[in-house]
Amino acid sequence: MSETSAADKTLLSKMEVINRYFPKQSYRTVNPIFYEKDFPKFFIPGKKRPLYPKDKVEEWIDSHIVYGF
């Protein structure tokens, strides 16, 4: 049985986003970005926590982190 890695997924959990895009940062350092109004989220009906679309997260990081707010 093979597990799907974060590289193959299109929807990532919060920890997968942190581990993939901010690997050497602590959770407390990165967590505030998830509460930005324009940070991309996807809610699945019946689920409590959102998932994050990988392509939109990459665009958001490119436009906000690389070039500044």
Image: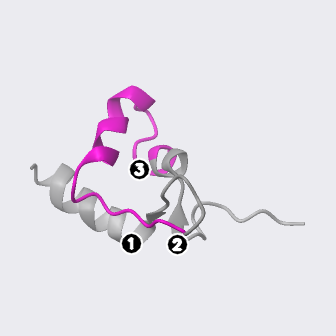
Residue 27: give its label: none
Q: Which residues are magenta?
A: 18-44
Tell me: residue 65, above or below residue 32.
below
Quadrant assignment for the N terminus: bottom right
Instruction: Give how far apart the Cα atoms at labels 1 and 2 are.
Output: 7 Å
Query: Tag 1 or tag 3, which sits nearer the N-term?
Result: 3
Could you tell whether 36 is left or right of 24 in the image? left
Q: Which residue is mark 1?
A: 55
Instruction: Give the crowd class for mark 1: few <14, some 14-19, many >=20 residues within 10 Å.
Output: few
Tell me: residue 61, above or below residue 33.
below
Query: Tag 3 or tag 2, which sits nearer the N-term?
Result: 2
Amino acid type at mark 1: Asp
Nearer to the camera, 17 or 20? 17
Depth check, mark 3 against mark 1: the one in front is: 1
**Residue positioned 34% across, 47% down in the render:** 34
Q: Which residue is mark 3?
A: 21
Instruction: Give how far apart the Cα atoms at labels 2 and 3 are.
Output: 14 Å
**Which secondary structure lies at badge 3?**
helix
Amino acid type at mark 2: Thr
**Residue positioned 33% across, 29% down in the render:** 29
